[in-house]
Image (cartoon, rainbow, N blue to C red):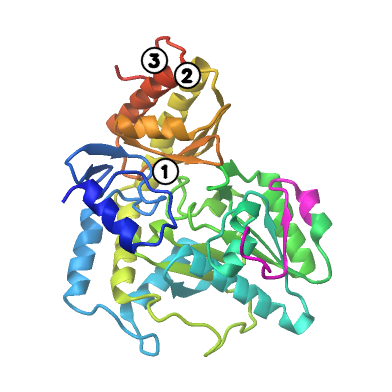
């Protein structure tokens, strides 16, 4: 079978909900993947950050093999050792918490929204403030929370009531607060929105505002969590900041589908009790075993410090590219969550990079985004920078020597 044959099957039997590239990936190891025709790529956008340990990390594979021989699924009305251990580990790595497990980031955000609305029931509060350019998922509530009109088109009437403030503008948030407001929800770093990092003063102001108004601060760490920013969770970069609710997914399972929303124990009220929320597959022993292996590997292999070092190398390379090519307007991000903002459309650059063997992402029309595996090597970062140098040299028309290149 060839890629063209797979495409025909998709055209006949799969709903066309994704903008797909004509590549069929069949094998992955670390930061490398191979397509059906045997071509190798350097993957700097592994599954939107899902494969944060790289593809098929041995620790995750071994955990899955062992668990698959024992028990694949346990219904959630029985106790599940792996789920209990994982909830404890998440709390240990973040803040004293209790955890609800699901299967995806959208489900985690749905659960957090549901939790907030239930929390506000006694006081008649239900409005949630989110941010413009945000992205929280594709389900109805998560889509509505997303502060981008393009995701809302065709799905009216939309769920009420979500209000969208300007990211990094505390006054914009305060202007939307009403007696009905129950929560503020945001990503510490907007991912799909183009890699915008929350400023310390903004986060501190939101925490103070929520404390003063008895509102919940919900942090969507679906993309920023699990070491992506050089700390286990991005909120840990901000002094004195803890969320009331944190949502996780993507890298949490090292390639396995799992999500969670994490509720701070300082919330004493029992908000969701038996029968109010559930998930058939949430927190399966298989997914939890994989997630425990991810946590263990990040700590055992020193991947947080490694992520900081590789992020510095990547950022320095991006700065050199920006100095060389006027088409690059800005380099932004944190550690291994980085982007280049261009002065023109970014899609042709992502396509050319793919043609040259590098997988990256184009978002927001003019942004190139990368989320390399936390296990990425110095050699791989330099190779990616060399490919990008050749891509910009070819497409931008500016030809000069660049010390960030490997050729």
Is residue 148 visible in this depiction of the protein?
Answer: no
Q: Which residue is mark 1?
A: 371
The location of residue 66, given as percent across then percent down, is 18, 70
Q: Is residue 163 magenta?
A: yes
Earlier residue among tags 2 and 1 = 1
Q: Which residue is mark 2?
A: 396
The location of residue 284, given as percent across then percent down, is 34, 76
Which disc number belongs to residue 10? none
Question: Quadrant of the rendered structure where residue 382 is?
Answer: top left
How far apart, in angstroms, are the residues tagged by discs 3 and 1? 23 Å
Q: Where the C terminus falls, by quadrant? A: top left
Q: Is residue 235 magenta?
A: no
Q: Main secondary structure of the magenta part?
A: loop
- Residue found at x 34% / y 30%: 384
How far apart, in angstroms, are the residues tagged by discs 2 and 3? 18 Å
Question: Quadrant of the rendered structure where residue 326 is?
Answer: top right
Q: Which residue is mark 3?
A: 403
218 horizontally vs 169: left or right: left
């Amino acid at each position: 079978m060839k890629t063209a044959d797979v495409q025909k099957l998709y055209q006949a039997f799969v709903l066309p909900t994704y903008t797909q590239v004509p590549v069929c990936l069949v094998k992955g190891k670390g930061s490398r993947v191979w397509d059906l025709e045997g071509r190798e790529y350097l993957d700097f956008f592994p599954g939107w950050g899902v494969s944060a340990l790289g593809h098929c990390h041995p620790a995750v594979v071994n955990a899955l093999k062992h668990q698959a021989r024992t028990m694949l699924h346990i219904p959630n009305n029985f106790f599940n050792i792996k789920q209990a251990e994982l909830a404890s580990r998440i709390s240990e790595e973040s803040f004293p918490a209790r955890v609800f497990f699901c299967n995806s980031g959208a489900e985690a955000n749905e659960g957090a929204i549901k939790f907030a609305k239930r929390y506000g029931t006694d006081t008649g509060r239900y409005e949630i403030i989110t941010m413009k350019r945000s992205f929280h998922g594709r389900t109805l509530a998560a889509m509505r929370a997303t502060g981008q009109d393009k995701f809302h088109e065709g799905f009216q009437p939309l769920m009420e009531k979500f209000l969208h403030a300007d990211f990094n503008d505390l006054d914009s948030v305060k202007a939307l607060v009403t007696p009905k407001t129950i929560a503020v929800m945001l990503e510490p770093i907007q991912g799909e929105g183009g890699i915008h990092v929350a400023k310390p003063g903004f986060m501190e102001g939101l925490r103070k505002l929520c404390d003063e108004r008895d509102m919940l601060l919900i942090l969507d760490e679906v993309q920023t969590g699990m070491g992506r920013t050089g700390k286990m969770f991005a909120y840990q970069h901000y002094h004195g900041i803890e969320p009331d609710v944190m949502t996780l997914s993507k890298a949490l399972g090292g390639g396995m589908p799992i999500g969670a929303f994490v509720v701070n124990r300082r919330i004493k009220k029992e908000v969701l009790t038996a029968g109010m929320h559930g998930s058939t597959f949430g927190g399966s022993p298989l997914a939890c075993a994989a997630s425990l292996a991810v946590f263990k590997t990040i700590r055992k292999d020193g991947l947080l410090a490694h992520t900081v070092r590789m992020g510095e190398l990547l950022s320095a390379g991006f700065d050199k590219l920006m100095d060389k090519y006027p088409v690059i307007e800005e380099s932004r991000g944190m550690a291994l969550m980085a982007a280049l903002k261009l002065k023109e459309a970014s899609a042709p650059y992502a396509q050319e990079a793919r043609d040259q063997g590098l997988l990256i992402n184009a978002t927001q029309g003019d942004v190139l985004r990368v989320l390399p595996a936390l296990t990425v090597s110095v050699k791989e970062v330099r190779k990616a920078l060399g490919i990008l140098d050749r891509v910009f040299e070819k497409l931008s028309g500016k030809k000069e020597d660049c010390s960030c290149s490997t050729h």
